[in-house]
Amino acid sequence: MDIIRDLKNVQLKDSAVAIGKFDGLHLGHKLLFDEIKSKKKEGQQSVVLTFVDPVRSDGTDPSGKNIFSIKEKREILRGMDMDVLVELPFTKELSSMDPNTFVKDILSESLGTRSAAVGEDFRFGHKRAGDVRMLKELGKTYGFSVSEFKDLCTEVPDSLRSEDIKGECRISSTLIRKALLEGEAEFASSLLGRDYFIEGIVKKGKGLGRTMDMPTINMSFDKEKLVPREGVYASVTVVKGKEYFSVTNIGRNPTVKENGDITAETFLWDFSGDLYDENVMVIPKKYLRGEQRFGTVDELKEQMQRDMATALRILNEDNK
């Protein structure tokens, strides 16, 4: 998959283009991706056009963070067999572009669009002046067709319902973020159509787990990635393509650290070896409890043993 971040001097030909921010790459987005892949039989290459917002640096507002990091999104789209990914930084120049110029300069001249796929709420151009109806009209002028896809809806669990989220709600990145922030990783994964995961390079920690005969691996979060609800999860960890049952603590480890950064610390069953500097994937499955501060390391060890027993029971049941 080719990755393009600057359209200067880019002139693609015969492209089927899915357009959107595509934060979560969820089931609704998959409809668009399936549509553009279906155009390959007509000789069109599949192009995903997405917009990259600057990440809020203060980290206080989760709505400013992405469900998947840019690196993770690239890997997911590569796995979906996309031909080209266009990551356009959402600059002032792009935001002030009128709808006709957007279609002419970007879709027609740079991307060589022959067909486009968008969601029903798609907006484009300065002050979101363009909508799907306008895109279809401009498509006639510039020689491409437009497929519009309606939102998908899902039944929302009671734990996530609120004044703005009722019993049934459209599948959206907003709903997925809310699920993750409430510890509902399984529900988030059902909306994504794939397991939600945390991926990264294993870093050295304090080595406390090893002294308790419970060695753990430590990973930090990319700055643009949303951190799920802090606490302990039953999880599955993928190492070099092999899956291991595991328990993951997402948080600051208050028993042994003061004001530490948020990390994902994971204990793996039936694994021995050194994973430092290895890339691993952790899949949170079930939220077990919130993070706690313990008076002694022995109290922490006893709770970890209880967590591992609970997680193992849950994972074995899910694996039947």
Image (cartoon, helix red, strand yellow):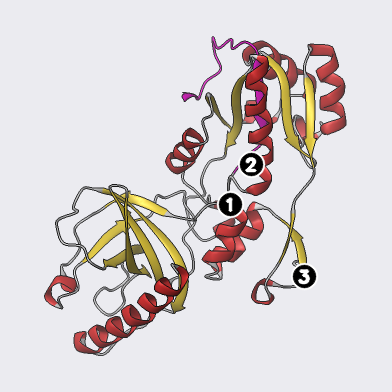
Q: Quadrant of residue 110?
A: top right
Give 138 or 280, whichever is nearer the viewer. Answer: 280
**Residue 182 drawn in magenta:** no
Residue at screen point 52% across, 20% down: 6
Kindly indicate whether the residue at mark 1 contacts the one at mark 2 (C-beta within 8 angstroms): yes
Q: Position of residue 68 (x, y in %)?
A: 49, 48
**Which mark is first along the chain, 3 or 1?**
3
Residue 261 appears in the picture as rendered: no
Point out the residue furthest to the front here.
320
What's under tag 3, amino acid-wise? Gly
What's under tag 2, amino acid-wise? Lys
Q: Circle 2: is it few (<14), some (14-19), or many (20+) Cα within 10 Å?
A: some
Q: Position of residue 225 (x, y in %)?
A: 47, 52
**Which mark is first along the chain, 1 or 2?**
2
- Bounds of the magenta span? 1-22
As helix, strand or loop, the secondary structure at mark 1 comes to loop
Q: What secondary structure do most residues of the magenta stretch adopt?
A: loop
Give 320 or 284, whichever is nearer the viewer. Answer: 320
What's under tag 1, amino acid-wise? Gly
In the picture, measured across the screen, residue 152 lies left or right of residue 224, that is right
- Disc 3 designates what residue? 167
The residues tagged by marks 2 and 1 sit, at their Cα atoms, a distance apart of 9 Å
As helix, strand or loop, the secondary structure at mark 3 comes to loop
- Disc 2 designates what residue? 30
In the image, which disc is placed on residue 193? 1
Q: Circle 3: is it few (<14), some (14-19), or many (20+) Cα within 10 Å?
A: few
As helix, strand or loop, the secondary structure at mark 2 comes to helix
Q: Position of residue 22 (x, y in %)?
A: 61, 41
In the picture, measured across the screen, residue 42 lies left or right of residue 233, that is right
